[in-house]
Amino acid sequence: MEATVPELPEPSSAAASATASSAPRSLAEALRARDDASLAALLHARPDLLGPVPGDITQLATRAGTRASVVRALDRLDRFALQTAEALAVAPDPCPYPVLESLLAGEHGGGSGAREDNGARAELPRALATLRDQALVWGDDERLRLVRTARELLAPAAGRPSPTGLGPTVAEATSGMSPTRIQEIVAAAGLPATHDPVSAVAALTGLFTDPERMSALLDEAPAEAHQVLGRLVWGPPYGEVTPNPTPPVRWLRDRGLLLPASARTVVLPREVALHLRGGLAHRETEPLAPAVPADREHRPQLVDANAAGQALAALATVEELVKSWEHTGPPVLRAGGLSVRDLKRTALTLDVSEPVAAFWIELAYAAGLLASDGEADERYAPTPAFDDWVELPPAERWSALAGAWLPATRTCGLVGDQDAKGRTLSALGPDLDRSAAPEVRGRVLELLAALPEGGSADPEALLARLDWERPVRGASSLRARLARWALTEAEVLGVTGRGALAAHGRALLEHRDPAPLLAPLFPEPVDHVLLQADLTAVAPGPLRRGVGEVLAVLADVESKGGATVYRFTPGSVRRALDSGRTASDLHAFLAEHSITPVPQPLAYLIDDVARRHGHLRVGVASSYVRCDDDGMLNEILADRRSAGLGLRRLAPTVLAAQAEPGALLDGLRSMGYAPAAESPTGDVVVTRADAHRTPARSAPVPVPDGPPVPDTTLLAAAVRAIRAGDLAATAVRKEPAATPLVPGELPRTSAADTLATVQAAALTGSAVWIGYVNADGAASQRVIAPVRVEGGFVTGYDHTADEVRTYALHRITGVAELAEEHL
């Protein structure tokens, strides 16, 4: 059971002195030593440090060590970089590079601390560079230091287990123990007694970190004691004990190999666990990202064609959805969003499942095609942008949809889940934004794009790669769910085909216009159908807009796909007649747009419905029925189904009704008649409904994941401002002996002294250090070289801003000359 624990090397005094003098003593010094490119890289990786721009390097270092910023930075590390930070959190502080290497990769050679080379040793410099670039680690390779906040977050604690599975150190575990008990443990471990608890703990720590003495001590342990240690060694390091523990546990506890954590709990000290592990911080390290191989390979042309078919179906579905809401859209819930009943109704209309219906609804909303109308009886309706969208070529319409899907933060997969308060999340409702969604969606597409053209990936391999790139610190599985939803949505939308990224999907990912690649894959719209004797019509492709709109009124869609099947029914023909068309109009339309003769049954159906259409007239009294055939009116009165309409005869050709005109129309139609509505002047009322539109609405703005990533111009300006502020803050001044300046505090001089000093500097061409308070009350430190002093203002070259500026003398709090070596 021999093992070795990495020990700190002991450099010579000369080497130590040289290292101490050259190594940075704080994170601020380490950042100050960076070049501008390195500072810009830090601000790019951690944009939260720019809100607002730090005044100098010290402020930058302070902000980089705050808990919120460190948590965000840790959450964006890959698995091995995070494991490196976790190892540093349990390593000595500071930690030499060889010690860190042995914690992650094991020792060189074939001893018990050796680990099969899995690439950890080769990848460690890359992981360490990542931590340094993000200011989570500072110091040279001899004295690596993890930022204090990161150490607090990752180090073991009683209420927060370490990801390494290690427990507290001997010193931490014995901090509340009585000196007598510590001496008893020291004696049981075979160590000489000491004069104080501190030296006793140090002696016990020395024993546990000495491989030879530790092995000799464990050789004396009972076999059952080794089993107890084996259950705790890889974590969790805590175990429950009874007031009268078993002999093996008592043997371990007496010698400090298990230390009390509470009245009924013991803990395995970190030094003991590291010895038993062979000095390894993790059971398994994952230095290399899991590969995402091509699970299946398809011909690229087949992938593109399949994706184009899905894209065309997506356009038809979105158009059908929005048009189904243009007359009477669903109401907006009081808390916002769509009711479950309306979602089910929409799913039935689109002939899809409810989760898929939620996806199309959210996609149309993200593209700005749907919104609430904002009226008193608030409902969802198409926006004016929908009218512009439907007039675009199909490829451009798809580009608009896909361009809204890729950066969207609204997550339709959450519909039906419950929030923290137990409320069900609804489509179009609040609380559906997840800022990680665009990043996960884009990364899934990037991994697919890295495969050979036509290659699809195993979803599990994709999830494993995403989990390595951004491991979840906690129990949340949201990122995995987002990745699965991204794969499903990309396939339904037509970004992928058969699981592989299509050419137009690749263009979308690369922020190129996918329309030119997609347009050739779409079939040309047709203006004809094939009429069949069974009262159906087959559209062999997408119909031209005018033809499709008329046919959608004249017939009902029976099946969708590459060829759409329409069925003519008495109700659909009556619907066309109600919209103002005549029987001759319908015959002419079918004859013009059918490449087959109009079947006789269809012609008879149109003529029969038209002959009966409008024979009965319904108008406003409460309502009435008018018909020249009094026999038909007698037939209606005799029908028991008309009892609920409250009919009574007013004249041989007129019946009065208690029902409203709309209810009367529906009632007579349910009885098999074909009445038409009549206006007060006796004309047939055309019942074509007006399409409802919302006022102009903008598409929802994605909710970003933290502050936006700064561009190159902003980064350059920020670095310049930080350098300038640091120059002013660190400038060495001549300080009067009587009134020494406190570091970081603005100088205080009288108005006369201030004027005299800046005038003298203007005459001699020297620079001075000033404290200045602007009109907003913000104080700053500046290094300026005055060139002119007049009218209550001093004009000079500002070294901190690298430009000529003018300052009001009454706003200068004080002035100090620079030291000779800084002039």
Image (cartoon, rainbow, N blue to C red):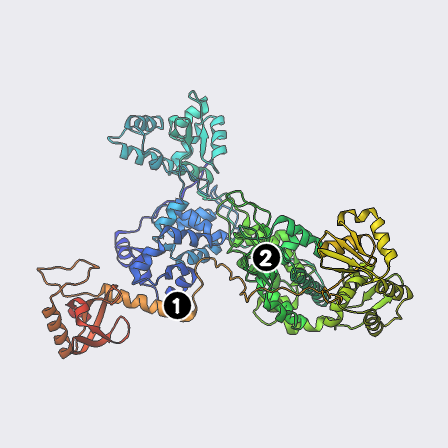
Give the residue displayed 50% in from the left and 51% down from the top: 79
Which of the two labelled residues, at mark 2 and mark 1, occupies the earlier sequence position?
2
Residue occupied by mark 2: 379
Give the quarter of the image for residue 504: bottom right
Viewer can see residue 544: no
Q: Residue furthest front?
A: 651
What is the x, y in percent for residue 467?
54, 51
Left or right: 689 in relation to 5: right
Q: Amino acid at mark 1?
A: Leu
Relative to 817, is 217 above or below? Answer: above
* Secondary structure of residue under mark 2: loop
Viewer can see residue 7: yes
Relative to 175, is 41 above or below? Answer: below
Left or right: 241 in relation to 699: left
Left or right: 584 in relation to 177: right
Residue occupied by mark 1: 715
Give the quarter of the image for residue 597: bottom right
What is the x, y in percent for residue 622?
70, 55
From the image, which quarter does the C terminus lie in? bottom left
Q: Residue furthest right?
A: 600
Q: 166 or 110: nearer the eye? A: 166
